[in-house]
């Protein structure tokens, strides 16, 4: 089992920045896909940004972003088990509950990288609110 705990959410004015962190503990995998999804009230859960660690031979450090956050959000890692999402130039439409998610293997395993059904492990979520 893998446990994921998010931190760093909050309320910010449009144009501001926030950084979300995700601490992973428990079982580990040789290679895995991990990142963030978000869900706004009345909307479906949406992939925001994920990364694939690589298996030492291919796709090392590959990242994926939804188009609406490209050039504003950056996913990176403090260490192998603690990724973070740096969110800049935040917009009111970024307001949502943000969830850390993970699965073993490549991000395309069992579905596209942004198919939330394909992720096995989830954090409890952290709220991000952007006011205009």
Image (spheres, rainbow, N blue to C red):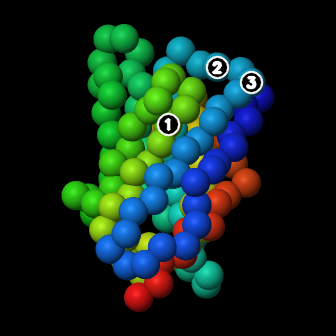
- What is the number of the mark on residue 64? none
- Note whether 18 is above or below 132 in the view shown: above
- Residue 73: give x, y in percent of width and height: 33, 56
- Residue 41: give x, y in percent of width and height: 62, 81
**What is the tally of numbered marks visible in this picture?**
3
- What is the number of the mark on residue 26? 3
Q: Hey, which residue is sitting farthest top in the picture? A: 56
Q: Quadrant of the C terminus?
A: bottom left
The residue that label 2 is drawn on is 28
Q: Is residue 104 left or right of residue 4?
A: left
CB contact under 8 Å: marks 2 and 3: yes
Q: Secondary structure at mark 3?
A: strand
Q: Secondary structure at mark 2?
A: loop
- Note whether 20 is above or below 32 in the view shown: below
The residue that label 1 is drawn on is 83
Q: Quadrant of the N terminus?
A: top right
Q: Is residue 33 left or right of residue 68?
A: right
Q: Is residue 83 visible?
A: yes
Q: Residue at x 67, y 58 (%)?
A: 125
- Residue 82: give x, y in percent of width and height: 55, 32
Q: Nearer the viewer, residue 72 or 41?
A: 72
Q: Quadrant of residue 60?
A: top left
């Amino acid at each position: 089992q893998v446990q994921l705990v998010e931190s760093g959410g909050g309320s910010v004015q449009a144009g501001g920045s926030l950084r979300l962190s995700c601490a992973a503990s428990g079982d580990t995998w040789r290679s895995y896909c991990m990142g963030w999804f978000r869900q706004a009230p009345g909307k479906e859960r949406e992939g925001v940004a994920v990364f694939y660690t690589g298996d030492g031979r291919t796709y090392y450090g590959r990242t994926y972003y939804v188009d609406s956050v490209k050039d504003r959000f950056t996913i990176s890692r403090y260490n192998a088990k603690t990724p973070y999402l740096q969110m800049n130039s935040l917009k009111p439409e970024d307001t949502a509950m943000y969830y850390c998610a993970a699965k073993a293997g490549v991000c395309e395993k069992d579905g596209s990288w942004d198919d939330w059904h394909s992720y096995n492990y989830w954090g409890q979520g952290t709220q991000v609110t952007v006011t205009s």
